[in-house]
Image: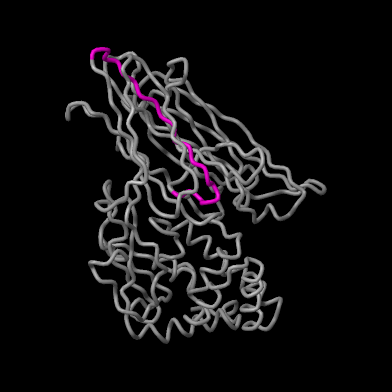
């Protein structure tokens, strides 16, 4: 398995239960190997039936654990049901989540965990498969388990640490806890561990307009993230002089937005060196959702001119910023009912872009996110090697309705992101301008590209 854990994505597919999952192999206080399966299911992704004045959704969750050395050997299987009962219709669109966590005692080994969530009302299922490994605490070999990352919002009373289930961590979780176990099974050789929190140089910019020049190959916007350049935020050392296992925890508070790695290394010989790492990204407070005035304001970069946008972002008071956002929409659309529908569609696309195109920066900031927000889902999508083509027409030769993207660095174990850049062209100026005007006037609701 990869010694750098990066968490999972959003597993987003419209019309299906939205499952976010994390699985971790650990050794508990009784020295028993365990697998922890933690999941979040988005309320708004479920289908509800009405029972008198109550909205009801029913979920069937099945977890199957297999030893990867023997795929026919199902070590554990668990099935359980969860119900959601709510009288507030806002739950239909809510991006809040239903949490579940199941713990399995298993023998040491490498495992595949298959989790299936079925919406009993719609009959649709979402499946997510993950892998984990658990070292044998009885072997005469030293080891480090996988690193769990948990977060909580200290502004909320009685808030508790919950498992982070994706690479992205919303900044509202202002206290992060990292938990792992280290076992020293060689009493004659103490282990000295070095732990470092690194922050990588990465692109955080909003996608530039379609008619601008392409990015320079040396720019961070082109590279995306540079793992060779980082800042050490914190480092520490710890010696394990006695044989046995010890649980180690680190807590970090108020981390700035960006891409990080907590890595743990030992001072052992190169062939025996221990290494574990957990990558993660701090993003906007409610990511991938939009709730604060600033979260709602920032994606308007695709609809406003530079002067308008700078003036909006200079507002420091959240209430005044929200009022300015409302004025922007109503002044342009000039019909409150139409404006309501346009606003709903725009921010729906922003959230969908976050879930589909998130990488080292928010999904809405990517080139794919920009095109998706402005033009909607492509009619056709074709991928060839490092090329991606989105078509909004049956005529795939029409340059105004087809967009080409190039991936400077293909996704791999060492570069775990899709990073597609639009092939920009000056003739896109009119296309983007016209599309912006459709959004600003509300005609986007009746226009088909």
Residue 102, position in %: x, y? 54, 29
Give the vertical position of 254 relative to 277 (above or below). below
Quadrant holding the N terminus: top left
Give the vertical position of 336 relative to 131 (above or below). below
Question: What colour scheme does the image use?
Answer: one colour
Residue 193, position in %: x, y? 30, 29
Magenta segment boundaries in residue numbering: 168-188
* Residue nearest the observer in this picture, 355 or 169: 169
Say whether residue 5 is visible.
Answer: no
Quick one: which residue is furthest to the right in this view? 52
Give the vertical position of 193 relative to 402 (above or below). above
Left or right placement of residue 251 versus residue 186 in this view: right
Determine if the magenta segment contains residue 171: yes
Please state the total of marks drawn on the protein image: 0
Quick one: which residue is furthest to the left in this view? 270
* Residue nearest the observer in this picture, 130 or 266: 266
Determine if the magenta segment contains residue 118: no
Residue at image point 58% right, 45% down: 153
* Residue nearest the observer in this picture, 415 or 15: 415
Say whether residue 110 is visible.
Answer: yes
Residue at image point 56% right, 57% down: 289
Residue 298, position in %: x, y? 52, 68
Q: Main secondary structure of the magenta part?
A: strand
* Residue nearest the observer in this picture, 406 or 280: 280
Residue 438, position in %: x, y? 54, 82
């Amino acid at each position: 398995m990869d010694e750098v854990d990066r968490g999972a994505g959003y597993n987003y597919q419209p019309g299906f239960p939205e499952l976010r999952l994390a699985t971790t192999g650990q050794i508990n206080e009784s020295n028993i190997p365990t697998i922890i399966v933690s999941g979040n299911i988005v309320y708004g992704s479920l289908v509800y039936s009405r029972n008198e004045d109550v909205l009801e959704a029913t979920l069937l969750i099945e977890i199957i654990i297999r030893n990867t050395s023997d795929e026919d050997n199902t070590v554990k299987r668990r099935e359980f049901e969860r119900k959601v009962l709510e009288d507030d219709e806002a739950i239909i669109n809510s991006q809040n989540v239903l949490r579940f966590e199941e713990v399995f005692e298993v023998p040491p080994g490498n495992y595949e965990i298959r989790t299936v969530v079925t919406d009993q009302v719609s009959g649709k299922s979402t499946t997510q498969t993950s892998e984990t490994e658990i070292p044998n605490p009885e072997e005469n070999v030293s080891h480090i388990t996988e690193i769990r990352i948990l977060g909580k919002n200290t502004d909320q009373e009685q808030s508790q640490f919950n498992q982070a289930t994706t690479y992205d961590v919303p900044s509202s979780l202002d206290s992060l806890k990292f938990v792992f176990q280290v076992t020293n099974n060689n009493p004659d050789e103490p282990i000295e561990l070095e732990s470092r929190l690194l922050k990588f140089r990465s692109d955080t910019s909003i996608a530039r307009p379609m008619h601008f020049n392409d990015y320079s190959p040396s720019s961070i916007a082109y590279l995306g993230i540079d793992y060779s350049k980082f800042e050490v935020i914190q480092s520490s050392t710890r010696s394990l002089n006695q044989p046995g296992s010890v649980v180690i925890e680190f807590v970090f508070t108020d981390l700035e937005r960006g891409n990080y790695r907590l890595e743990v290394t030992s001072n052992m010989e190169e062939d025996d060196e221990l290494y574990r790492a957990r990558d993660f990204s701090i993003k906007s407070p409610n990511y991938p959702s939009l709730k604060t005035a600033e979260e709602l304001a920032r994606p308007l970069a695709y609809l406003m001119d530079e002067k308008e946008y700078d003036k909006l972002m200079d507002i420091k008071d959240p209430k005044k910023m929200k009022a300015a956002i409302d004025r922007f929409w109503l002044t342009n659309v000039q019909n409150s009912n139409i404006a309501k529908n346009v606003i709903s569609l725009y921010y729906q696309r922003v959230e969908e872009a976050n879930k589909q195109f998130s990488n080292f920066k928010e999904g809405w900031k990517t080139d794919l996110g920009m095109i998706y927000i402005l033009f909607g889902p492509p009619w056709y999508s074709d991928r060839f090697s490092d090329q991606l083509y989105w078509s909004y027409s049956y005529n795939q030769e029409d340059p105004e309705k087809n967009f080409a993207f190039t991936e400077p660095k293909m996704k791999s174990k060492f570069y775990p992101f899709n990073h597609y850049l639009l092939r920009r062209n000056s003739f896109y100026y009119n296309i983007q301008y016209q599309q912006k005007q459709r959004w600003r006037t509300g005609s986007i609701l009746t226009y088909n590209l």
